[in-house]
Amino acid sequence: MAFKIPGESPAEERFRKRMERAQQAQEEREKKVQASVSFQIAHREHEEEMRKWKERMSFDMYLLADRILERVEMQIREHTPKTPEEPWSEEFCNAVRMLPEARQFVEDCLMNCTKEER
């Protein structure tokens, strides 16, 4: 805010006003820089949080896939025919059919967990 100093010459007044404007401009630049730095810090923190979340979700997906494979293998063991003449149960056939897909799912999830993000 400009104010007149008693006994100030017009040249001194112009100089003082220029100094005030320069100071205000400097304060505005500092505010913009501070806002930019704050935004960048918040953005980096958000990216780091998202990266950790993705890692956790990938690992959870791997654990889930491993549990599915475990259940398929358990179903095969539980329903395996005891003798060669015994007919194959539907549970056994479904589990045998799903085994390669379950193994592939576990492998895909493991690769997803261990790959590096570039």
Image (tube, rainbow, N blue to C red):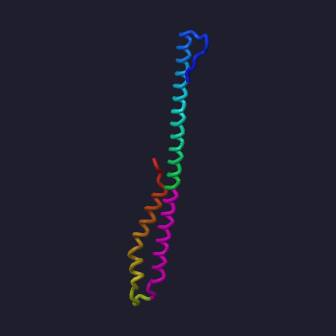
Q: Residue at x 44, y 86 (%)?
A: 81
Q: Position of residue 9 (x, y in %)?
A: 57, 9
Examine the rendered structure and indicate whether residue 28 appears above or below residue 8: below
Q: Residue furthest front?
A: 6
Residue nearest the viewer, comparing 77 with 15: 15
Q: Identify the magenta region.
A: 55-82
Q: Residue at x 54, y 18 (%)?
A: 17
Quadrant of the rendered structure where residue 89 is?
Answer: bottom left
Count of numbered tags: 0
Query: Considering the image in quadrants, where does the N terminus appear?
Result: top right
Left or right of residue 84, residue 27 in this image: right
Q: Position of residue 22 (x, y in %)?
A: 53, 21
Q: Residue at x 52, y 58 (%)?
A: 56
Examine the rendered structure and indicate whether residue 44 appears above or below residue 34: below
Q: Residue at x 51, y 40 (%)?
A: 39
93 falls in the magenta region: no
Examine the rendered structure and indicate whether residue 20 appears above or below residue 57: above
